[in-house]
Amino acid sequence: MSTTLVVLIVLALGAAGYVLGRGRALREVNGDQRRLHSLPSYYGTNVAMKTVVPAMLLMGIWLLAQPLIVETSVRGDLQDEAERQNRSVSLMMSDVRRVANGLDVAVSQGVMTRERASNMRTEFTDVRERLGQAGVALGSDVTSAVLRAAQRYRAISGRADLLRTGVVLALALAGLAFGLRNSTAGYRARNVVESGIKILLILAACIAILTTIGIVLSLVFNTIEFFRLYPASEFFFSTTWSPSFGGGSELGIIPLLWGTLYISVIALIVAVPIGLFAAIYLSEYASKRTRAIAKPAIEILAGIPTIVYGLFALLTIGPLLLRVFGDQTVGWMDAGTAVMTAGLAMGIMLIPFVSSLSDDIINAVPQSMRDGSYGLGATQSETIRQVILPAALPGIVGAILLAASRAIGETMIVVLGAGAAARLSLNPFEAMTTVTAKIVSQLTGDSDFRSAEALVAFALGMTLFVVTLALNVAALYIVRKYREQYE
């Protein structure tokens, strides 16, 4: 039974539990709800929560734990084969998952039976060709060890799926019965429901926190592993970035950081003045009709995919800059891919972030501050410059910080607009690259996570995380300083 069908059954049981719980409580008092401790809806909600919540929590935990347990069980079968082929077990496990999924697709399409999928052997069947008949493309031939591991992977997963379905539905039915049993006149259903909602909110907050912790720990552990293979001093202080999976790599982060900060600064130089001035106009000068048209038009920019901005930089901004600053005129620019190309495209992308957030922040400044300024004889421009902007400064700093974080983490615009050259240069018309672009390039394709050339991506990510955290700390200091001054 599919996961979606199980979820729908549990939700249906929850809906039925709501109706049955509410009806049972009313029957207890012969329809006189004044004799109930809580409103009838609370009794129904109590039954629905006890039916759905435990079952869904169990299913979520099971779905997270099952792949890890199954892969751990299968990995042991691949150890000898991985050593024989001089490949990592992780890479072979990715092949196992692809073959297992391909077998599932082939069975679902009727290309082969379940028995055939479970008993197939590479000595008698071209597995790659058979899966290709089902529309499953594999990059290489399937070895006997990978096929056996994939068949075992499918078998264990199938048994685990069946067990999960039974346990989840049994738990949902048990919760339904328990909730109905509690649907009596004196039961404090309202208190239970309110406590349950509070627990759910706490769990939601904990999930967000634990996710952040998990991301950081995954970066930390892989970064430590990288520094066991590559000297930290060369990574942080070398000015050369020249990875080579054949050996002899130079993995200095300085040119990547320089490109990241250079492009981000140019983007902010474009986005902050334009976005802030647009926000001031929309909030203080524009009529309601103009604002109703202009603000949505600006915010449309935020909905454009970044790949489109990258194509715009590659096909429009780059050739335009090349015509103006190219060899035939000034001679500063050799190709359309450059820091300025990516910076301008990224700055255009960031305008709605700065504009929309700053507009909301400026509108949140109390009208009494404006009236007081006008009452003292200040003009509108003086009021904006000396009253509104200082009062809104903490929020504006937050908007700029959000734009800076977006600029630092951008990838596609850089890949298409800035080029791939890792260099230290002050010339904004030369091609450069960023940390995020190199993270993508180092992890593209099959990566051997035992090598420094692949693990360096995690060190780059960790460095980027620390830089972003430092920006947040600096912004928080500025916000607190001005908040104490104006509140």
Image: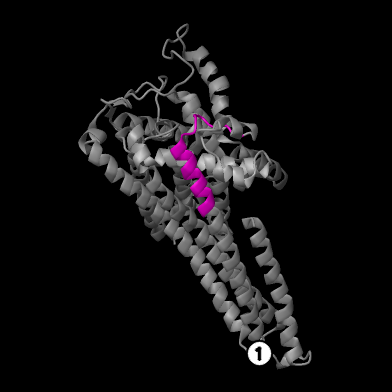
Residue furthest front in the image: 124
Residue 49 found in image quarter = bottom right
Residue at 38 percent of width and 34 percent of height: 435
Q: Quadrant of the N terminus?
A: bottom right
Position of residue 256 in the picture relative to residue 45 (left or right): left
Residue furthest top in the image: 328
Residue hosting label 1? 37
- Range of magenta residues: 136-156
Res. 230 visible in picture: yes
Give amino acid for label 1: His
Residue at 58 percent of width and 65 percent of height: 56
Q: Residues within 10 Å of mark 1 (few under 14, many from 20)?
A: some
Q: Is residue 271 magenta?
A: no
Q: Position of residue 470 (x, y in %)?
A: 34, 47
Res. 279 visible in picture: no
Q: Quadrant of the C terminus?
A: bottom left
Query: What secondary structure do most residues of the magenta stretch adopt?
Result: helix
Camera-side residue of 29 and 156: 156
Q: Position of residue 348 (x, y in %)?
A: 54, 33
Q: Is residue 87 above or below residue 324?
A: below
Camera-side residue of 439 and 96: 96
